[in-house]
Amino acid sequence: MSEHLGEDYPFGAQAKKMGLKEEELTPDLLWYQDVAWIEEADCMIAEVSVPGSDGRGGEIQHFCSREGLGLSLAPLLMIHEEGEGNPSAAIQSRPLKNSLFHLKGYKDLEEAKQIILKFLRESNLE
């Protein structure tokens, strides 16, 4: 969900972004920082091809529950690689709950980029 996950040393990159040393990071600090970003976000784009326990489900759920926190809902795009299994039922049901939530499959990286750009354009976030 966060760009630090694409880094060679994700925890070090996250710590630096938060003004901390890597050894100062705790699971609670990471969660609270992620929650703050989710609550500030104009939209969320999540890659949901591979089910896992990396926190994506909780982050998506928190984003989808913003109204309950007194925040406005915002556009959500969940993308998945076609042929890599199906996203979970919880993920698949999100677009049924609100027209701001979208689930799209892609065949390759170029198609994923095009889907994301279209989503941003249509959400007036480009």
Image (cartoon, rainbow, N blue to C red):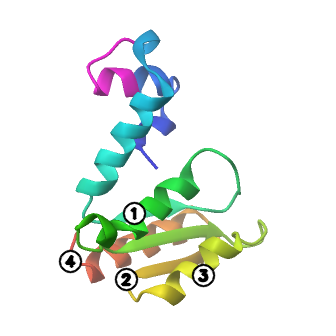
Name the side, left or right, on which 103 lies relative to 123. Answer: right
Check residue 99 for magenta coloring.
no
User: Considering only order in the chain, which callout, 3 or 1, is on the residue closer to the N terminus?
Assistant: 1
- Magenta stretch: includes residue 16: yes
Q: Which comes sooner in the sequence, label 4 or label 3? A: 3
Between the C-alphas of marks 1 and 2, the distance is 12 Å
Instruction: Tell me, for residue 93, which label it has, or none.
Output: 3
Image quadrant where one finds the C terminus: bottom left
- The label shown at residue 104 is none
- Return the mark for residue 63: 1
Instruction: Say whether disc 4 or disc 2 marks the residue closer to the N-terminus.
Output: 2
Segment colored magenta? 14-21
**Residue highlighted by disc 2:** 100
Give me the C-alpha separation between circle 4 and circle 2: 12 Å
Of the residues shown, which amino acid type is indicated by label 3?
Ser
Residue 124 is labelled as 4
Could you say which quadrant of the image residue 89 lies in?
A: bottom right
Judged left or right of residue 53, residue 68 is left
* Percent of width and height locating residue 35: 36, 47
Q: How far apart are marks 4 and 1 (CA)?
A: 19 Å
